[in-house]
Image: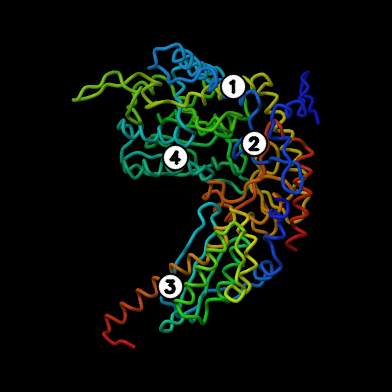
Amino acid sequence: MTVVEGTQTYDVARIREDFPILGRRLAGDFPLVYLDSANTSQKPVQVIDAIDDHYRQHNANVARAMHQLGAEASAAFELGRDKVAAFIGAPSRDEVVFAKNASEALNLVARVLGDSGRIGQDHEIVITEMEHHSNIVPWQQLSQRTGASLRWFGVTDEGRLDLEGIDQLITEQTAVVSVAWVSNMLGTINPLETIIAKAHSVGALVVVDASQAVPQLPVDVAALGADFVAFTGHKMVGPTGIGVLWGRYDLLAELPPFLGGGEMIETVTMAQSTYAPPPARFEAGTPPIAQSVGLGAAVDYLSAIGMDNIAAHEQAITAYALGALQEIDGLTIVGPKEAVDRGGAISFTLGDIHPHDVSQLLDSRGVAVRAGHHCAKPAHQRFGVQSTTRASFYLYTTTQEIDALVEALHHTKKYFS
Amino acid sequence: MTDAMNVDSLYQEIILDHYKRPHGAGLREPFEAEVHHVNPTCGDEITLRVHLDGNTVSDVSYAAQGCSISQASTSVLNDLIVGKNVEEGMAILDEFNTLMHGKGKIEPDEDVLEDGIAFAGVAQFPGRIKCALLGWMAWKDAVSQALVTTSSDTASTGDPK
């Protein structure tokens, strides 16, 4: 299956050859149909080899080892930071802070904003009903620590952010607005421009959870204009164990440290410590070294294909899936039903068959999806469902895989009828 | 492997029957303890009440939202436990729990578990073991609370039965 986009030919078959796991066959000799990329993406051989080569040839600790391998490992680790900075259009490499995942990156922001004294009991924090728990719980905790109130954007029946009350929601009291770029459950792409402009007009900071955006959309943080952007490596063909917090340098420079430990200090005496400048200030302890190498290889891989092409493929495959799924009797999509301002994750219910049972039957046909609340319980409550089944797509997903999903769903219906 | 992972070994007819027509569903009075348990991975929930008559479990009533496995296993629990005394009930729970954690290598005792033997296949699907145990863990919790309630009632009234 090829999608022609401009003068470039997007060759899915060719891309799939880079992902060894996509050739696996599962129980019953069914070929793997991997539709769980919003959960974690598969890894191309280029990333696997880069990590393998690092451990085989260059492994040492960074910054503190004065030997040749130490220099190589330090250079490789920092090269990963350079590559990520270039990939997201960061004005400076020092604005890229490595964390262990997006959850930790979001916790870091919430924690240090509180510790800085910027948020007090007269302030308000604004999030949305469609957030992943990792962009809810840290703000609930911050609200408990500081006495600031937590306020929420609602979601329309169509699965879009309800912007109608934005002027009452984001006010002079608002200290922070934190919002997902792309919803991991509904698939909605949120109108960040409007929200960022409104937040900045009242002097509030904007945090963007870009976990589902950076893997599938071209991202330029400088053009976006947010203050902090968090995402994770493993959803963008990179390894687990590394997440990224991008932050405006002037802000990072005035914020206190997150965790205390090695590498984040300037000097330590028994009386007190002073702290390193960003990003080291926020990276206590031995950092994710091989993971930075792997993430660097991942952004090289994505850049070589082109994020515009990947976004176009995601859009095409999502449109195809939305059409095919809606032809199944009893299937209800929870989230936008058209491929407009929409990412490649589709959550749905299938009659009254429980999502666990749906995913189990799909799995018996080699089709891997996610079932449950997808760490977005408030969004599920909003739509009156306890859980859903979610199929999610990426640069290697084919229309044949969507067809296999549809066929397996028909089989599921028959099984439980 | 292929046989072991066969989805039909998970969804036995008995399980699907209990799922479609659960035994003893609904919340009833009287009861000495009510608990609410959640499976955090999927959000499945159960509210379960226990009514003790002396040492006899005279009712287990429940309202649950969940998958076929969790619904069917709570239905089977109701069949197996109601009418037994607390110690017998705990022994059945142990037997069921052992079966669930037996990785498919344990031959279930039909005399003890009756329809519950149909859950032997669940043990081969690690992701579903929690589903099968949701109602049972709720029952264990509820009966422990009920025993405390009834014993403290007895103590406070000073009127042992």
Residue that badge 3 annotates: B143
Instruction: Decide: few, some or many residues near mark 1? Use Cα within 10 Å; few <14, some 14-19, many ≥20.
Output: some
Left or right for B73, reference A253: right
* C-alpha gap between disc 4 and disc 2: 23 Å
Mark 4 nearby-residue class (10 Å; few <14, some 14–19, many ≥20):
many
Left or right: where A251 falls relative to A100: left
The residue that mark 2 highlights is: A343
Q: CA distance from mark 3 to mark 4?
A: 43 Å
Check if mark 1's residue and mark 2's residue have beta carbons within 8 Å.
Answer: no
User: Label 4 near label 3: C-beta < 8 Å?
Assistant: no
Of the 4 image quadrants, the one containing the N terminus of chain A is: top right
Circles 1 and 4: CB atoms closer than 8 Å: no
Given residues B70 and A60, the one toward you in this image is A60
Task: State the residue at coordinates (65%, 67%).
Answer: B118
| Front disc: 4 or 2 | 2
**Farthest left residue?**
A271
- Whole-percent x, y for residue A78 in the image: 48, 17
Q: Are marks 2 and 3 on the same chain?
A: no
Residue for badge 1: A50
Gap in Å between the C-alphas at discs 2 and 3? 47 Å
Q: Please state the chain letter of the residue tagged with numbered disc 2 in the rendered image.
A: A
Sequence-first tag of 1 and 2: 1
